[in-house]
Amino acid sequence: MSQDPVNPIDDVALDWALRMADPARADWDGFTDWLESDPRHAVAYDRMAAALLDAEDALRAHPDVIAPEPVMVEAEPPRRRPLRWIGGAVAAALVGAVGVGLWSERPQPYVIETAAGEVRRVPLADGSAIMLAGGSRVTLDHADPRRAVMERGEALFEVRHDDRHPFSVDARGLALTDLGTVFDVRLGRRVTRVAVAEGAVMIDPRGAALRLDAGQAVLAEGNRLVRQAVEPEAVGGWRDGRLAYDGAALSDVAEDLARFLGRPVAVRPSVAAQVFRGTIELNAVRRDPRLLGALLNVAVREDGQGWMLEPRG
């Protein structure tokens, strides 16, 4: 017998009901924001919470079922009454009642993001790690630690290879699969760039199936893929405070500078397409932004809290 389609709001409401019943996973601020974002959320949450409590009562009514030890919710309630306790048997009973599949197999996404100027290393459960540059955001999944979705910014992936469970990255719709790899992903305003430092990456494995080995990169703009050569040791050089370019437009350089330095960097349209080849030492630029003028062949003007790159007069 086929199950009825899952209501996506109920699906998320069940996530919150289970999460808020566990003090180790409760997120009061996120829960409140979710409730207030749509009046239907509160109704769905109440329905899922009631189903959980019904499942609890049903378990208690059958002595042949061993109920789990109660997990008490901390006495700091938000604007709605939390569940009293929850355990594996109750969750399983609810799953059967509402027909949404096993909890352990359902997506459990979470977001990691950095502020401009911040660098953060995120270790993963499988032994891999992601180094996030400033102003970046990636969505991960507790239920599937071998998958990541890049949403903005730049990240260096250090992947523990597993032939049976390859690590995959969705970079603005561009599918990447590791082949034993250290690789960098940058999401620019127009262009996505993937560069490989170690191992190999398969780009768009179900479509173009373009393989990148160490020392190679690809620029993706729409459906167009352009392969480039890179220095493997320069991939992810931003971790050490260096930005290396080989033919990048100044608009892209300015975007990177803003993300890594944590201050606005704009560029005049007349020089936005100007090409730059070279390396920028971020610490030196922090101390003296005028160094950018000589490096980029532009004038650098203080513009409020940031800098404006302009044509030389």
Image (spheres, rainbow, N blue to C red):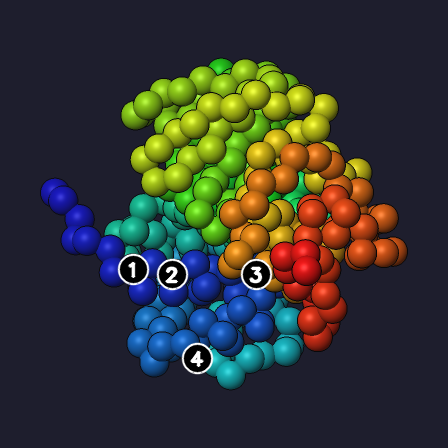
- The secondary structure type at the circle numbered 3 is loop
Tag 1 residue: 8
Q: Are marks 2 and 1 in contact (CB under 8 Å)?
A: yes
Say what amino acid the circle numbered 3 marks.
Arg
Q: Report, in whole angstroms, how far the alpha carbon at label 2 lies from the one at label 1.
A: 6 Å
- The secondary structure type at the circle numbered 2 is helix
In front of the other: 211 or 242: 242
Tag 3 residue: 268
- The secondary structure type at the circle numbered 1 is helix
**Mark toward the start of the polypeptide (1 vs 4):** 1
Q: Residues within 10 Å of mark 3 (few under 14, many from 20)?
A: some
Q: Report, in whole angstroms, how far the alpha carbon at label 3 lies from the one at label 4.
A: 41 Å
Q: Which mark is residue 36?
A: 4
Of the two numbered discs 3 and 1 in the rendering, the one whose residue sits closer to the viewer: 3
In the image, taking residue 223 as reference, residue 239 lies left or right, namely right
Tag 2 residue: 12
Q: Residue furthest front?
A: 313
